[in-house]
Image (tube, coloured by chain):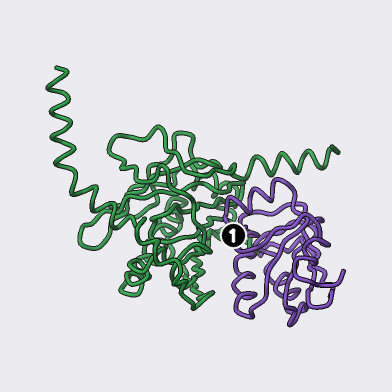
Chain colours: A purple, B green
Amino acid sequence: MTEATATFEVQRHGIASVVDIKGDVTAASEDVLMAAYQDAGDSRAIVLNFAGLDYMNSGGIGLLVTLLVRANRRSQQLLACGLSDHYRQIFELTRLDEAVSIHDTEAAALNAVGADH
Amino acid sequence: MSELNEERAARDATNWAKTVSRLDVTDMPDEAVDLVTGKRLVGPIQGFGQMWQKTYQVELPRDQVAPQELILTWKQNFPEFWPEGNRFYAPLTGIAPGEVALINARMPGKMTLSTGVMVLYADDESFTLMTPQGHMFAGWITFSATERDDLTVAQAQVLMRASDPIFELALGLGGHRQEDLFWNTTLERLARHFGVETEADTTVICVDKKRQWSRWTNVFQSTAIWSTIYTLGTPFRAVRGWARRGSTG
């Protein structure tokens, strides 16, 4: 199997957890992404910060859909921030933006869910 | 912009389709039925039924074919690996991001469903097709090839929900089995192209057991309904065509 080339660091901000994404997100990132999601625990909201994203392919977008299902199952809100214009368009194209609310900055995303930052 | 950032931007622009609000189909043969123009794309989030991730794989010796060569061949000959009776009308420019292909899929009872797909993503080792409104399922299918030890693993992975209650029912009544057979046959034909006789492996995961009842209205877009209406209208279109030719001749 291809090795994961992305890292996912989790920081707790009150009721929300921020997952800092760095590197290339592909289908090979599944284990590390899901481990980061477990680290986020019972947060009411998960903010995916894409500011450090280098690249994402369609396998990476598929992972986000799977993550969204898991978050919905636990009644957690999923948000995204730090997306480049290109990946904002990819969220629109794949219609992920209908289920994941997109914010310009981490602070804006945390404000939206009423979390500390 | 730094050289690295320019390189990344170029890779993004090359591999991903541009944003489109509605699909547009051009340059297709006359026999290809276009019920796709004007439709929006739909992903697994917009579907009705349970969400499934289905993975089909075949293994080939790497000294026989490398992943990039396999994907290149798959892209160039995509329709040829499909099971008999199903037609994939590839765009003239081939499997490239943003291109739309039409599909005439054979269903039980000699029914043919007319639908299509858009190439969402394509690089040297994978490509992804995304479905439009009305398609049997809402989602995408990714075709990829990777190295594992001394093998090249060719894979088709579907992430989808049935689009509407009719197709959800159909999946439960043999549709899943038919889909598994379809992609297993495709992968086995692909392997045979490289001189390898093998059976495909199938792994099925139910990602979400919940049905999205708020999406039941997708049924009004269903290709099952619109393909039937199109088929019933064939004699009328033929008469209209003769009348036009008569008036101009």
Residue B98 in percent (x, y) is at 54, 41
Residue B85 in percent (x, y) is at 28, 52
Q: SS class of the residue under badge 1?
A: helix
Q: Residue at x 55, y 48 (%)?
A: B120
Q: Could you tell me how many numbered marks the image carries?
A: 1
Whether B116 is drawn above or below B137: the answer is above
Residue B70 in percent (x, y) is at 54, 49
Q: Residue furthest bottom?
A: A42
> Quick one: quadrant of the C terminus of chain B?
top left
Residue occupied by mark 1: A98
Q: Nearer the viewer, residue B12 or A19?
A: A19
Q: Around disc 1, counting alpha carbons within 10 Å, would you say few (fewer than 14), some (14 to 19), or many (20 or more)?
A: few
Q: Nearer the viewer, residue B194 or B226?
A: B226
Whether A95 is drawn above or below B36: the answer is below
> Quick one: quadrant of the N terminus of chain B?
top right
**Residue under mark 1: which chain is it in?**
A
Q: Residue at x 44, y 64 (%)?
A: B198
Residue B194 in percent (x, y) is at 47, 51
Q: Nearer the viewer, residue B85 or A8?
A: A8
Whether A53 is drawn above or below A64: the answer is above
Report whether B159 appears left or right of B36: right
Report whether B205 appears left or right of A5: left
Whether B192 is drawn above or below A30: the answer is above
Q: Place residue B236 in its image quadrant.
A: top left
The three-letter code of the residue at mark 1 reads: Glu
Q: Nearer the viewer, residue A36 or A29?
A: A36
